[in-house]
Amino acid sequence: MGSSTFIDNTPPSFDVIIAGCGPTGATLAAELRLHDVRVLVLEKDTTPASYARIVGLHVRSIELLAMRGLLERVAEHGRRRPAGGFFAAIDKPAPEGLDSAHAYLLGIPQPVIVRLLEEHAIKLGAQVRRGGAVTGLQQDADGVSVELADGEQLRSRFLVGCDGARSTVRKLLGVGFPGEPSRSETLMGELTLDAPPGEIAAAMAEIRETHRRFWLRPIGPGVYSVVIPVAGVSDRDEPPTLADFRQQLRAIAGTDFGAHSPRWLSRFGDATRLADRYRVGRVLLAGDAAHIHPPLGGQGLNLGVQDAFNLGWKLAAQLRGWAPETLLDSYQTERQPVAAEVLDNTRAQMELSSAGPGPQAVRRLFTELMDFDEVNRHLIEKITGLAVRYDFGAGPDLLGRRLRDITLRQGHLYGLLHRGRGLLLDRTERLTVGGWSDRVDYLGDPTAGLDVAGVLLRPDGHVAWIGDDQRDLDVHLSRWFGKPVG
């Protein structure tokens, strides 16, 4: 399968090759290395991105970093802000009592978070090769042959495309990417503006009455984060110029505010697409290779990282030979609906950010409705990932959701999840993981801050079982962790 006709019957040198070393690819590599999977990450760019765009880590992603012992290191490079005001940039406070010990947004420069995740993967033993662009692939019953731009051929047991919105891996697979093309685009960058701060603030307040996607935010002495809506769509292969920014500022604000000395400039469209398959045999897709959407609400990076946490342990289980038959397919079953919901909420946010009188009337109505705590909470939980609940069948509301970082006799729950294994948390101290002890840890703690007798956690922190019956527990251990040993 793919554009090449090469055939390579040599034994795989790697268990998994990952195309793309962005946040998704680096996270996936680290998750696989927790299970001693041989990983090679191929990044087509020869050097890391130099632009310093600030991205936001939402609550669920922060929790996942805490689960792997990474949060403290990452947090020292970021800046906290309240977990509110994300939906269509409607300025409402963060709801009180969000179900997390990490109920905040962490703003961090994108190159920094990518570097930290890559360093973590390398420390765990992943190999990262820059300048390695995938141009062909072919799979068979035993593995995947990968061809690079320089003609080199590599062999692995699985390949995962984490290579972005224009994913070469997805195109070589022939996976459909249905959705809507861009109808408009937005310029984004960081520039120095010479105009007085008061003049800039007044102009922004006036313009945002009709252009909700317009933004001039100070981030340093004279330096501003600039976001400008543009009518129509340009050639995405051509990066924007300072002249483009000045022209569009004058068109909207009547002045370019003396803009000069850009730190970085980019453009993004409002294309919204979802891959119709996340897996074709031994090749899988994750992150932007599987879904793209406008960046409203800051969900893209988080969605990809959470894909990686869902996929990593399942792919490792497949490679280690203990995965139940349907486990790897559950990656698409669980993550594709989550992506579909993100696409829908960004579509809604784009409409609420439009300048027409109809969308603005709906925006005013939403602004009123969000004064109700239930509405504000619902929308924030949706954007931050706290609302995600996988369908594990009938059961209490906690089933299928992630478990917050509760207090235990031994400290905090997430401190026990650094190795990427399952965990049985037993308040009765009568249950056991038995023949699954090589894959699932056990903790008996009557003091645990739970209102149920026991929970079985998957390596991604989602609750796979609730109860106190050993036979029922064994059924669910088999469902998620395969056959017991002995």
Image: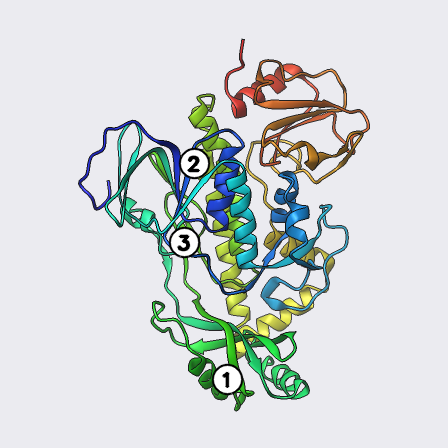
The numbered mark, 1 or 3, whose residue comes first in the sequence reads: 3
Label 2: few (<14), some or many (≥20) within 10 Å? Answer: many
The residues bearing labels 2 and 3 have C-alpha atoms spaced at a distance of 19 Å
Residues marked 1 and 2 touching at CB (< 8 Å): no
The residues bearing labels 1 and 3 have C-alpha atoms spaced at a distance of 30 Å
Q: Which amino acid does label 1 sit on?
A: Leu
The picture places residue 196, in percent across and down from the top left corner, at: 65, 88
Residue receiving disc 2: 39
The residues bearing labels 1 and 2 have C-alpha atoms spaced at a distance of 46 Å
Q: How many labels does the image show?
A: 3
Residues marked 2 and 3 touching at CB (< 8 Å): no
Residue in the image at 54% along x and 32% along y: 34
* Picture layout, residue 364 above or below residue 54: below
Q: Looking at the rendered structure, which numbered label has been put on residue 463?
A: none
Residue receiving disc 1: 249
Residue receiving disc 3: 164
Q: Is residue 4 left or right of residue 37?
A: left
Q: In this view, does 143 lie to the left or right of 440?
A: left
Q: Which structural element holds mark 2?
A: strand
Q: What residue type is labelled 2?
A: Val
Residue extending farthest to the left is: 5
Q: Which structural element holds mark 1?
A: helix
Closer-to-camera residue (62/42): 42
Q: Is residue 386 visible?
A: no
Closer-to-camera residue (242/351): 242
Q: In which quarter of the image is residue 374?
A: bottom right
